Image: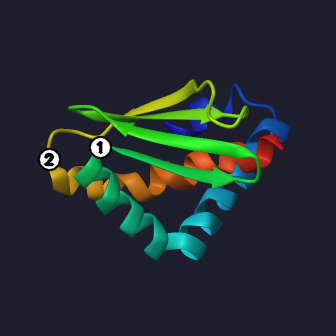
């Protein structure tokens, strides 16, 4: 499957994709314990906020997934940027949420 997908991407696209996922992995390694604690908090409360510079990140659980929204106007408005399916089980949510947090933070940090 990988080689099929690579046929449609330019070498620049492939390098950008590799750099992006390398950065996500770096964030996961650097903040793994924080992400795990935040995942537990999110599963317990259903909603979590954090800040990166002037941006406010909001994560909100629904029955089977998690939405990521961003506010750049001090929380006046939020734009939903991503949603991921996590499944019903608490264990599934706790397992995948750290990657989702790192992915979303990478998007915000790289957009600046």
Q: Earlier in the sequence, mark 1 or mark 2?
A: 1
Question: Disc 1 versus disc 2: distance between alpha carbons?
Answer: 14 Å
Residue lying at the far left of the rendered structure: 89
Structural crowding at the residue carrying mark 1, measured as other residues with C-alpha within 10 Å and reported as few (<14), some (14–19) or many (≥20)? some
Secondary element under disc 2, as helix, strand or loop, is: loop
Query: Are the residues flagged by discs 1 and 2 in contact, CB closer than 8 Å?
Result: no
Residue depth check, mark 1 versus mark 2: number of the one nearer the observer: 1
In depth, the one of 85 and 15 nearer the eye is 85
Residue 71 lies in quadrant:
top right
Return the x and y of residue 66 as percentages of the image width and height.
37, 37
Structural crowding at the residue carrying mark 2, measured as other residues with C-alpha within 10 Å and reported as few (<14), some (14–19) or many (≥20)? few
Q: Residue at x 78, y 36 (%)?
A: 13
Residue 37 lies in quadrant:
bottom left
Q: Is residue 7 left or right of residue 98?
A: right
Return the x and y of residue 102 as percentages of the image width and height.
55, 55
Q: Is residue 14 left or right of residue 102?
A: right
Number of marks in picture: 2
Image height check: is 31 above or below 90? below
Q: Residue at x 58, y 45 (%)?
A: 104
Q: Residue at x 54, y 66 (%)?
A: 28
Return the x and y of residue 103 as percentages of the image width and height.
57, 48
Q: Is residue 55 left or right of residue 98?
A: right
In depth, the one of 43 and 28 nearer the eye is 43
Image height check: is 48 above or below 78? below
Q: Quadrant of the C terminus?
A: top right
- Residue under label 1, please give it: 46
- Residue under label 2, please give it: 89
């Amino acid at each position: 499957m990988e080689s099929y997908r690579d046929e449609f991407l330019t070498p620049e696209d492939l390098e950008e994709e590799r750099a992006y996922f390398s950065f996500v992995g770096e964030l996961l390694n650097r903040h793994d314990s924080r992400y795990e604690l935040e995942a537990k908090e999110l599963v317990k409360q259903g909603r979590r906020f954090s800040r990166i510079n002037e941006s406010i990140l909001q994560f909100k659980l629904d029955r089977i997934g998690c939405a990521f929204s961003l506010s750049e106007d001090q929380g006046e408005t939020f734009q939903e940027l991503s949603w991921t399916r996590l499944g019903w089980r608490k264990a599934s949510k706790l397992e995948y949420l750290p990657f989702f947090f790192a992915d979303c933070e990478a998007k915000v940090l790289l957009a600046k």
